[in-house]
Amino acid sequence: MLTAIVMIDATPAQIPEVAVAVTAIPGVSEVYSVTGDTDLIAIVRVKDHEDLASVVADGINKIPGILRTQTNLAFRTYSPADLDQAFDLGLGD
Amino acid sequence: MLTAIVMIDATPAQIPEVAVAVTAIPGVSEVYSVTGDTDLIAIVRVKDHEDLASVVADGINKIPGILRTQTNLAFRTYSPADLDQAFDLGLGD
Amino acid sequence: MLTAIVMIDATPAQIPEVAVAVTAIPGVSEVYSVTGDTDLIAIVRVKDHEDLASVVADGINKIPGILRTQTNLAFRTYSPADLDQAFDLGLGD
Amino acid sequence: MLTAIVMIDATPAQIPEVAVAVTAIPGVSEVYSVTGDTDLIAIVRVKDHEDLASVVADGINKIPGILRTQTNLAFRTYSPADLDQAFDLGLGD
Amino acid sequence: MLTAIVMIDATPAQIPEVAVAVTAIPGVSEVYSVTGDTDLIAIVRVKDHEDLASVVADGINKIPGILRTQTNLAFRTYSPADLDQAFDLGLGD
Amino acid sequence: MLTAIVMIDATPAQIPEVAVAVTAIPGVSEVYSVTGDTDLIAIVRVKDHEDLASVVADGINKIPGILRTQTNLAFRTYSPADLDQAFDLGLGD
Amino acid sequence: MLTAIVMIDATPAQIPEVAVAVTAIPGVSEVYSVTGDTDLIAIVRVKDHEDLASVVADGINKIPGILRTQTNLAFRTYSPADLDQAFDLGLGD
Amino acid sequence: MLTAIVMIDATPAQIPEVAVAVTAIPGVSEVYSVTGDTDLIAIVRVKDHEDLASVVADGINKIPGILRTQTNLAFRTYSPADLDQAFDLGLGD
Amino acid sequence: MLTAIVMIDATPAQIPEVAVAVTAIPGVSEVYSVTGDTDLIAIVRVKDHEDLASVVADGINKIPGILRTQTNLAFRTYSPADLDQAFDLGLGD
Amino acid sequence: MLTAIVMIDATPAQIPEVAVAVTAIPGVSEVYSVTGDTDLIAIVRVKDHEDLASVVADGINKIPGILRTQTNLAFRTYSPADLDQAFDLGLGD
């Protein structure tokens, strides 16, 4: 499973509507309206790159009100569960 | 529950080690090594702001190798489940 | 009580009118026309995140003339009164 | 009374200590640890420019751990109270 | 007397006309067409902040062709005459 | 006479000392400690380019604590006096 | 043979169509839809500079939907094969 | 096969040596010394994300002299051959 | 003789036409279509500042398709011939 | 003959010395100390790319005091003489 974190800048007046439209795209697992210098952050979880292209290039980017998107693809994931497992196997030190 | 998405720039040579250290902080649910112009993205889920301050200001920021962090706090969350529910209640149109 | 400091870029010719419109939004405690590379700074004080979303996403962002907004949410507050109290309790050194 | 909103970038590991040191400077009314692309925001309220120079140039800037400061001085202030008053006087329309 | 140095970006084709319009605003003491990454620099000298707001927010910003303005307000002034005086008083070493 | 407006970024803790050192350089007519995203602005008035090079490259840039300087040279100057004169000559319309 | 790597920003909604149009230009060897803060990266391989000018200035830049292009021309190329050869000749140490 | 285009900023004096070191990493197919605002561009071709992480996070980033790297991962590839094939199948119009 | 190096950003589709128009302006000695993050670089050689203002403010900036120009004025020139001469006079060591 | 325009940022205190060192490199035809947001601009004229790499990567970049260089390579040159010739041949309209 691929995870991508997509930063979305939108026209200020259309941010809530853009958020709903992005959330409706299959492959988008959640969308946050956030503080900071980006307007929305979408978490995308898909099977492969072609799906990612459909969600981002053919999906999110086509929504009216979107000014810019920047996709950060996760190529390595760390979770507390992994760390615990590593420590159990003595790999931690 | 508060969700924050924290962008982390780290010294290139220490990125994997920083990722492990960040993941070990209570309140951090996952950390991604990502493509794009930030090095790591941490998803933080905590009870309240004071916890967020402990995780970010007293936790992540203290890790050697961290150059800059930028916290994007989610103040509104959209999920496919919410949309389905809204449509069920006829709020969708 | 949540405090957010919202940076607002507006069309130069509409800055005073935008300032008045932002000030009229419930939850906005004051707005400053400022020097520096942002046009207006609004101090927002609200009960919770949902209120913050209403003030920023459904309120400020909808005002004609607004080009970009950037919300900085305070997750820890320091005041001289707190410091005095801390020193009284001998926590200061 | 002059109001200035000072953006402060600090070495990540020293942000809490810097916040306390800034808060202790006479003229600083509150300091926030914030989300977004600045680390701290200090609200400064002083009598005149010379005081402002003392607080910023001779005070805040001298604190170890400070990387950059950017002062936004308020040259016009809008508050809900002013608007109410203006409406009472029929100036609002 | 307050001094402010205002950076002005204007539509390239209208820079000379914008310069003349800015110069005509009471409170503007001179305007320079400059090299570098800003188009015009206006030196504003006014009595107080309210005047500064009128010159910048109600004056300069309203001129057609202005894209962005950034006001740098002087809060401390150094001149050779001050230095000479300080040296005469033995404050210089 | 050439006029140049020099933006100066300096180490925060050394700004006042840098201001005094810059002011002492022959050719510098005044230096301002300013709000906004630059620390100091120096107004330089010299006879020709070689003098400008001495003041900036051999003078200002050599002062300890200076991080970056950016020189904006005025190649056309507008003043209210010029405008009045132009109007007297009927050139104004 | 000259190699150039061209960064392309396009209107989000037209990225796939722009990619196809760029790919059709003689001299373009491949185009990638990418993560990160640029939308497309085109690899151009041509005989000489005049060809490069035709591909970029007269070709890519003329495609509707293109916002900005930035051409990075390779003036020295390193490949594993070169390294192996260099090591064979004892130039490696 | 995954393709990534990695932008590399290096200490100016070490660029040639960094280029050789990057080229020696398995998975790097070529490295270019380029004009423009990045120093080197590496083309990486690997089997999967874990390999990409090893090449970038555990390989390139560990090389002395590297200041910053930015990985652009290709999630959709267009080539003239694909276009010809598409046209043959009548998909082109 | 004054030398200025003018960076020109233009609408991508009009770069060649803008280059021809700029070249036709008296005082422009050559124009380059370049790689990197600017589109054109014009070398301007004029007698004095008023001429420079005419070439840039009244000439280049008025050309349709120009988005931004940035003028870098040379205030000191170094050439191999000067160095040779300096060495001949024993000033070199 | 290849022409490249190289932007050079240097440590402020070493700009004149860096300028002399760059000028001494074979292939550099002139160096300017300039206004604006870059410190020096070098005009490089060489036979081919390998020479360009020697001048920039092995020459300029190795000079102590250089912080960053950005090479803009000319891939099409326009000069008044070309225009006159084109007009003579009736190509101008």
Image (tube, coloured by chain):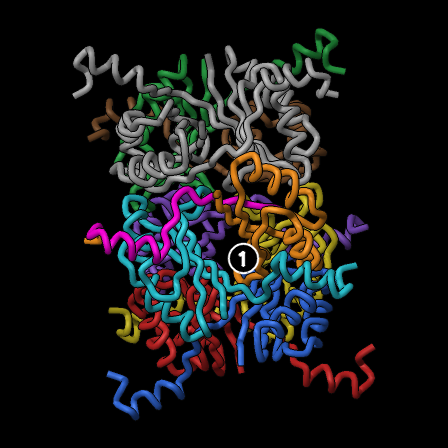
Chain colours: A red, B blue, C cyan, D orange, G purple, H yellow, I green, J brown
Residue sitting nearer the eye, C46 or J5: C46
Establish if D3 lies above or below C6.
Answer: above
Residue sitting nearer the eye, D30 or G74: D30
**Residue I92 in the figure: left or right of residue H27:** right
Q: Quadrant of residue A53?
A: bottom left
Q: Is residue D84 magenta?
A: yes
How many other residues sit within 10 Å of disc 1, few (<14), some (14-19) or many (≥20)? many
Pointer 1 indicates a residue of which chain? D
Establish if H39 lies above or below G32.
Answer: above
- The quarter in which the C terminus of chain J is drawn is top left
* Residue I51 position in % (x across, y down): 35, 16
Q: Residue furthest bottom?
A: B88
Establish if I26 lies above or below G28.
Answer: above
What residue is drawn where x is 36% and y is 44%?
A: G57
Residue sitting nearer the eye, B86 or C35: C35
Q: Is residue B51 visible?
A: yes
What residue is drawn where x is 47% and y is 65%?
A: A35
| Residue occupied by mark 1 | D37
What residue is drawn where x is 61% and y is 58%?
A: C79
* Residue A3 position in % (x across, y down): 52, 77
Helix, strand or loop at mark 1? loop
**Residue H39 in the figure: left or right of residue I57:** right
Q: Quadrant of residue A9?
A: bottom left
**Residue H47 in the figure: left or right of residue A44:** right
Please give the range of residues in magenta: D68-91
Looking at the picture, which amino acid does disc 1 mark?
Answer: Asp
